[in-house]
Image (cartoon, rainbow, N blue to C red):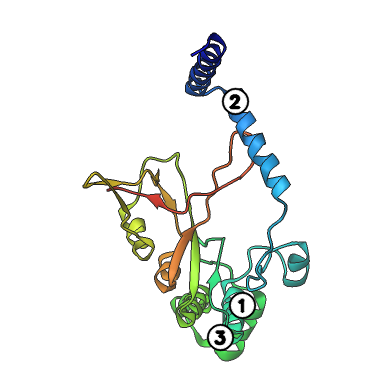
Amino acid sequence: MNKKWLNSITFSIFLTLISFYIYSLDLTFFQQLELKSYDFKVRIRGERPISNQIKIIAIDEDSLKKEGRWPWSRRKMARLVDRLIEADVAAIGFDIFFPEHENYISPERFEEGIKQQQTQKMNAEELTGWYQGLNDADQQFAKSIERSERVILGFFVNPADKKLNPDELEQLDFSQYSIVQRFDDRTQPLPLRQIVSVGLSIPELMNAANAAGYVSFVPEMDGVIRWVPTLMQHGE
């Protein structure tokens, strides 16, 4: 082996060791460099074709001008689900969630209730019960979701909170998967991002839905969202 060849091997080994050392330092500069390199590769790749079978119902400025300020009534959301069922869509996914009961009764709904009920003869208790009965928006939305048999509700994951409500987790049973990987005849769990807390829609809607999927995103250090985990894990 000549000296020139030996020097080349030595230099290659040296560069490899330096690379491993730099990588082990986990320096922010090199992390940023890796992210920008990925962005560059994506730009060179160009845009990929988007399926025409997927439609987005956006809550944008035009929608707000036409339908009114957000949040919209659950009665309106129920009608939306019903219309999508009539269109025979394969699945309906919500990337928003509904964590509280709807307490608002629109003037139109109140006027409709007045026409259907003689409230003048009611006492205070009866009038209170009648008024509360007008607010059936959550029930209507839940019925539309259940009737569709194709709604997927969103929920978010919060990695900062270490307290997880077991009752909330039970509502996600239909989104549970048992994933293992085998190494040398030994079963080991896959390295998945851990769930420590979740934010769900109200139980009436969660119980009516066909499935649920998380809509949380974890941005990189520069604030850009480049990927999301397909699965997340809680417990064993």
Mark 3 touches mark 2? (CB < 8 Å):
no
The residue at the point 34 percent across, 59 percent down is: 177
User: Where residue 73 appears, x then y in whole percent?
Assistant: 60, 71
Residue of label 1: 80
Depth check: give the residue in front, 86 or 179: 179
Q: Residue furthest left?
A: 185
Residue of label 2: 30
Residue of label 3: 120
Marked residue nearer the N-terminal end (2 or 1):
2
User: Where residue 70 appears, x then y in whole percent?
Assistant: 67, 63
- The circle drawn on residue 230 is none
Mark 1 touches mark 3? (CB < 8 Å):
no
Marked residue nearer the N-terminal end (1 or 3):
1
Residue type at mark 3? Gln
Is residue 100 shown to the viewer in this render?
Answer: no
Spatial CA distance of label 3 from label 2 is: 74 Å
Spatial CA distance of label 1 from label 3 is: 35 Å
Mark 2: secondary structure = helix
Mark 1: secondary structure = helix
Q: Residue furthest top?
A: 3
Depth check: give the residue in front, 137 or 113: 137
Depth check: give the residue in front, 234 or 37: 37
Q: Relative to 184, say whether 59 is above or below.
A: below
Marked residue nearer the N-terminal end (3 or 2):
2
Is residue 52 shown to the viewer in this render?
Answer: yes
- What crowding class fits label 3: few (fewer than 14 Cα within 10 Å), some (14-19), or many (20 or more)? few
Which quadrant of the figure has residue 69? bottom right
Residue type at mark 2? Phe
